[in-house]
Image (cartoon, grey):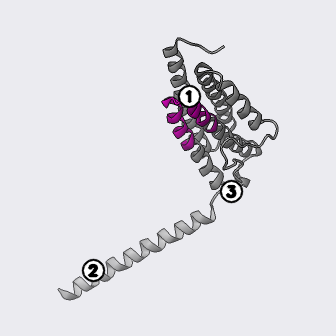
Amino acid sequence: MRKVFGCGLLFTLIIILGITSISFARAARNQSQTPDATSLTTDEIEGLEKMREEEKLARDVYKAMEEQWQKKIFSNIVDSEEMHMAAVKMLLDKYGIVDPASPNVGEFSDDEPNKFQTLYDGLVSEGSESLQNALCVGVKIEEMDIADLEDLIAETTNSSIKRVYGNLLAGSKNHLESFQYNLDILGAECH
């Protein structure tokens, strides 16, 4: 009886070691197959860089509007935009793409064709004129995000990118509805 138990234990140990070896081999193979930017098209890389900056633009403008107007809609959406930024950053990291976003709030590259610094300065100025304008700035940003995300989704076949962009798109549509709802409460609309 003791020998059978000993053989069973040895057999179990051999199976565990075998499974562990296979798991380590798979992990090593997957690590050596980690995707990099060369597995993406130039358009996909530029799209990720643009969306990182665009999500930062939204967050930074909404931070400025929240400070100015002290309205919960802005602070709530700031939190959401930070999650959007983090999702795009994970893709940048996954593919070894340098993060174009400045760590400083309200600071952007003004490279063509996006001109994010110019856009940020103009939107903050416009939103500082009135609460209605601030909400309309939110509408503009979310409409821009939606249009850009729809274009980028159509241009990629990469499932990871499509999934993240799809989540960002759903978030932007929710944000747009929130801004429009708040405008309705004011009895206002954007011109």
Q: CA distance from mark 1 to mark 2?
A: 71 Å
The image quadrant where one finds the C terminus is: top right
| Residue 134 on the magenta span | no
Q: Which mark is residue 8?
A: 2
User: Which residue type does callout 1 highlight?
Assistant: Trp
The image quadrant where one finds the N terminus is: bottom left
Above or below residue 8? Residue 79 is above
Name which residue lies at 63% across and 65% down.
Answer: 32
Q: Dots 2 and 3: beta carbons under 8 Å?
A: no
Coordinates of residue 155 in the picture (x, y in percent) = 70, 36
Viewer-side residue, 26 vs 108: 108
For the magenta stretch, what is the residue range? Answer: 60-83
Q: Secondary structure at mark 3?
A: loop
Q: Secondary structure at mark 1?
A: helix
Q: Main secondary structure of the magenta part?
A: helix
| Residue 66 on the magenta span | yes
Viewer-side residue, 92 vs 62: 62
User: Which residue type does callout 3 highlight?
Assistant: Gly
**Left or right of 57, for residue 10:** left
Q: Secondary structure at mark 2?
A: helix
Local crowd at mark 1 within 10 Å, few (<14), some, or many (≥20)?
A: some
